[in-house]
Image (tube, grey):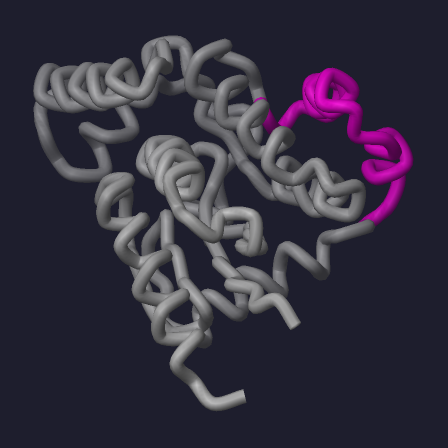
């Protein structure tokens, strides 16, 4: 039987390092010799479960307040993040980004996973937040983004609590295994990579996990 390598990834659609890590991981996966035998499972993680859906401040202001730094320093750090994104072919506009609650976005991602569209839905939500300045908690916006990604059933999703338990389960599991920051990648249940450490680090983790898994007795 052909071996399969599972990679579990916890991330949040409003996390810049998660978006960078998303691109880094897929670059690594494209170079991995056994990439066709890797199963990726994305898991929900909210950076701030109490984040409001209608926050009016800027990311610069949020960063400055969180770390007690001057607003100019926060702006410089965000520009540096934009430069890092540009190296991966992404054009971010953090001044336009609308900080918000990501719970319903994670429910949409869980719905997309049922339709084998998890990766494209996740990428579209990342881009909506970091590049397009869209409010990724707004139900109409989420429905439109889902339609763009060919994900069906979002309107009925918001009529009830579908996939709410799935999101909370992912977050509970993260707490149980000690994940406190994202992105957090676990390769074959054993090898952990925390943060956007780079495509080469992730490729090495893929190769080590595959090698160690192949050496284990059946």
**Quarter of the image that includes the C terminus:** bottom right
Give the x, y percent position of residue 19.
40, 32
Instruction: Check if residue 40 falls in the magenta segment.
Output: no
* Residue stretch rendered in magenta on the structure: 136-161
Q: Is residue 76 visible?
A: yes
Q: Is residue 74 above or below residue 114?
A: above
Q: Is residue 165 left or right of residue 182?
A: right
- Of 81 and 69, which appears nearest the observer? 81
Determine the residue positioned at 31% across, 37% down: 17
- Residue for point 30% across, 58% down: 205
Of the pair 17 and 73, the residue shown nearer to us: 17
Q: Residue 56: tell me if it is visible.
A: no
Q: Residue at x 50, y 10 (%)?
A: 132
Q: Please tell me whether residue 59 is drawn above or below residue 3 in the rendered image.
A: above
Is 32 placed left or right of 162 in the picture?
Answer: left
Residue 124 x/y as whole percent: 58, 23
Q: Residue at x 58, y 55 (%)?
A: 39
**Residue 57: percent from left, percent from top:** 37, 19
x then y, percent, for residue 18: 38, 39
């Amino acid at each position: 039987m052909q071996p399969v390598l599972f990679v579990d990834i916890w991330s949040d659609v409003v996390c810049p390092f998660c978006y960078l890590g998303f691109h880094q991981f897929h670059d690594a996966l494209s170079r991995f010799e056994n990439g066709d035998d890797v199963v990726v499972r994305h898991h929900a993680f909210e950076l701030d479960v109490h984040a409001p859906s209608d926050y009016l401040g800027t990311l610069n202001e949020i960063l400055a307040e969180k770390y007690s730094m001057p607003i100019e320093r926060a702006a410089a750090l965000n520009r540096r993040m934009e430069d890092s994104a540009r190296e991966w072919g992404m054009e971010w506009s953090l001044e336009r980004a609308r900080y918000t609650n990501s719970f319903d976005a994670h429910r949409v991602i869980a719905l997309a996973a049922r339709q084998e569209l998890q990766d494209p839905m996740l990428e579209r939500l990342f881009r909506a937040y970091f590049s397009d300045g869209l409010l990724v908690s707004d139900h109409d916006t989420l429905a439109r983004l889902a339609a763009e990604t060919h994900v069906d059933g979002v309107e009925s999703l918001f009529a009830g609590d579908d996939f709410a338990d799935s999101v909370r389960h992912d977050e509970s599991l993260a707490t149980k295994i000690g994940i406190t920051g994202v992105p957090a990648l676990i390769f074959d249940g054993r090898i952990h990579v925390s943060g956007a450490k780079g495509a080469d680090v992730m490729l090495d983790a893929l190769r080590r996990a595959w090698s160690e898994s192949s050496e284990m007795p059946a």
